[in-house]
Amino acid sequence: MTVPYTPDLVDELNTLIRFNLDSTQQGVKVHKTADAKVIAATRRLHAKGLLTQEDGGYLTSLGRNAAEHAQAALTLLTAEVAPPASAARDLSAAQA
């Protein structure tokens, strides 16, 4: 059974995409003045074993895997999509 994305899961995904995957030396610090949703998402990610600290810190190995997938999905979903070849042919025929 597939569970749809809940607002809490979206907040967690938005937190994961903030991590720089090019360096294991950079973490994220969520300050007490941050949006309550961001603070809660960061705490949940820590409780799930994806972050080293309740206020962010670094990605664990499981967290890095999740962040890689979250960032890859975002890249795929926000990429410009070329029309299918049949649509391009239809467009060319219509313009002729």
Image: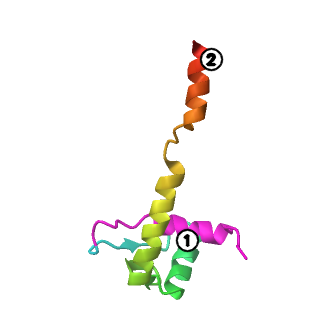
Q: Is residue 20 above or below residue 51?
A: above
Provide the secondary structure element on which disc 1 rests.
helix
Residue 31 in view of the camera: no
**Does 31 sit left or right of 86 as displayed?**
left
Q: Which residue is mark 1?
A: 12
Question: On the rendered structure, is 26 left or right of 33?
Answer: left
Quarter of the picture containing the C terminus is top right
Residue 41 pos. (x, y %): 56, 74
Q: Is residue 92 above or below residue 72?
A: above
What residue is at 52 percent from the left and 64 percent from the top? 14
Tell whether position 14 is magenta. Answer: yes
- Write the residue at 27% across / 69% down: 23
Q: How is the protein colored in the picture?
A: rainbow
Label 1 close to label 2 by CB (< 8 Å): no
Q: Which residues are magenta?
A: 1-23
**Mark 1 surroundings within 10 Å by alpha-carbon count, few (fewer than 14), some (14 through 19), many (20 or more):** many
Q: For the view shown, which residue lies furthest in the top direction?
A: 96
Q: Position of residue 78 (x, y in %)?
A: 52, 49
The kind of residue tagged 1 is: Glu
Give the residue at x 49% y 47%.
79
Q: Is residue 45 magenta?
A: no
Residue 26 x %, y %: 30, 71
Along the horizontal axis of the image, is 47 left or right of 19?
right
Q: Amino acid at mark 2?
A: Ala
With respect to residue 34, does 94 lie above or below? above
Is disc 2 placed on a helix, strand or loop? Answer: helix
Q: Dividing the picture into quarters, in which one does residue 68 lie? A: bottom left
Q: Which residue is located at x 67 percent, y 67 percent?
A: 7
Quarter of the image for the N terminus: give it.
bottom right
N-terminal label among 1 and 2: 1
Residue 64, image quadrant? bottom left
